[in-house]
Image (cartoon, helix red, strand yellow):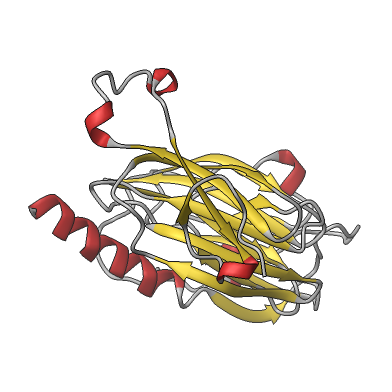
């Protein structure tokens, strides 16, 4: 119980930090562009993190991939990313002890999988307009046309950056939530298996009582779920997509 409560507090603090990420200042580079220099996180992001406390156990800024060098830079507490309108969007990395993976999905969307002290998550960065970013828990799975994306992330401890199931619509100028559900069935190893067209998702997970070896979950039968536009994207047991 203490661990779960600590996780909820941690997520709340992360949410407060990630809700105040943007600083609209002139930039010298844009994502996908060929500007002379990238933004400078040391100079163009706030001097202090958005939350107080000694949460940063790193002794140097996060190392960004070479592919990001034209449009991003990092300092001890921030990653600065150039936006489509020529401003800088600052992503708070105070909670990040390490970043496991950097993704560039297209000319707009970037992603960072991160690990922290008893916490982990995935930040999605949208460089449209003056830029925005949000914690979505895990790497998004896009629909065939990329007009939608979904995530499912759930742990017993509740220490993930986002705990639940969500679908977002991906517009050329930004993203908007379609459904965000934080009360998913109490199962292990939730995952998105595939999209069926643009209007339905197939997901699966494993009942806890079925698991005896947590080091190899691949050998256990999975319970199947679907979520579709016709059902308001609600998680429903079964493998048949809802119809109108």
The one nearer the camera, 232 or 217, is: 232
Count of numbered marks: 0
Q: Which of the 4 image quarters holds residue 42?
A: bottom right
- List x then y, in percent, for residue 68: 73, 48
Q: Residue furthest bottom?
A: 24
**Which residue extends farthest right?**
34
- Relative horizontal placement of residue 54, taking residue 26 as reference (left or right): left
Question: Viewer-proximal residue, 218 or 12?
Answer: 218
Say above or below: 155 vs 25. Answer: above
Q: Percent position (x, y) of residue 196?
A: 71, 49
> Could you say which quadrant of the image residue 84 lies in?
bottom right
In the picture, the quarter occupied by the C terminus is: bottom right
Would you place residue 117 above or below residue 123 in this image?
above
> Is residue 170 rendered to the left or right of residue 154?
right
Query: What is the residue that sits farthest to the left in this orientation?
Result: 2
Q: Is residue 40 visible?
A: no
Asked whether, in this view, residue 149 is left or right of residue 116, the answer is right
Identify which residue, 187 or 90, lies in the foreground. 187
Q: Is residue 243 visible?
A: yes
- What residue is shown at x 37% (from left), y 55% (from top)? 95
Q: Residue at x 71, y 59 (%)?
A: 109
User: In the image, what residue occupies the spot 45% across and 76% down?
Assistant: 19
Residue 156 spot, x, y in % from top left: 24, 46
x, y percentage for residue 55? 29, 55
Residue 128 in which image quadrant: bottom right
Q: Nearer the viewer, residue 220 or 135?
A: 220
């Amino acid at each position: 119980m203490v661990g779960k409560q600590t996780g909820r507090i941690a997520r709340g603090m992360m949410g407060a930090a990630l809700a105040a990420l943007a600083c609209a200042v002139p930039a010298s580079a844009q994502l996908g562009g060929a500007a002379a220099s990238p933004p400078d996180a040391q100079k163009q992001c706030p001097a202090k993190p958005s939350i107080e406390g000694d949460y940063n156990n790193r002794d140097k800024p996060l190392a960004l991939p070479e592919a990001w060098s034209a449009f991003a830079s990092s300092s001890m507490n921030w990653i600065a990313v150039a936006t489509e309108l020529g401003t800088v969007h600052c992503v708070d990395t105070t909670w990040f002890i390490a970043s496991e993976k950097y993704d560039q999905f297209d000319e707009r969307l970037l992603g960072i999988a991160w690990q922290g002290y008893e916490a982990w998550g995935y930040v999605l960065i949208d460089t449209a307009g003056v830029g925005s970013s949000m914690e979505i828990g895990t790497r998004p799975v896009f629909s065939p046309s990329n007009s939608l994306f979904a995530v499912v992330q759930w742990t017993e401890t509740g220490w993930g950056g986002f705990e639940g199931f969500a679908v977002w619509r991906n517009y050329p100028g930004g993203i908007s939530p379609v459904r965000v559900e934080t009360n998913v069935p109490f199962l292990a190893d939730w995952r998105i298996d595939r999209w069926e067209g643009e209007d339905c998702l197939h997901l699966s997970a494993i009942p806890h009582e079925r698991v005896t070896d947590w080091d190899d979950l691949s050998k256990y039968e999975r319970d199947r779920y679907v979520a579709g536009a016709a059902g308001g994207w609600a998680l429903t047991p079964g493998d048949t997509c809802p119809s109108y």
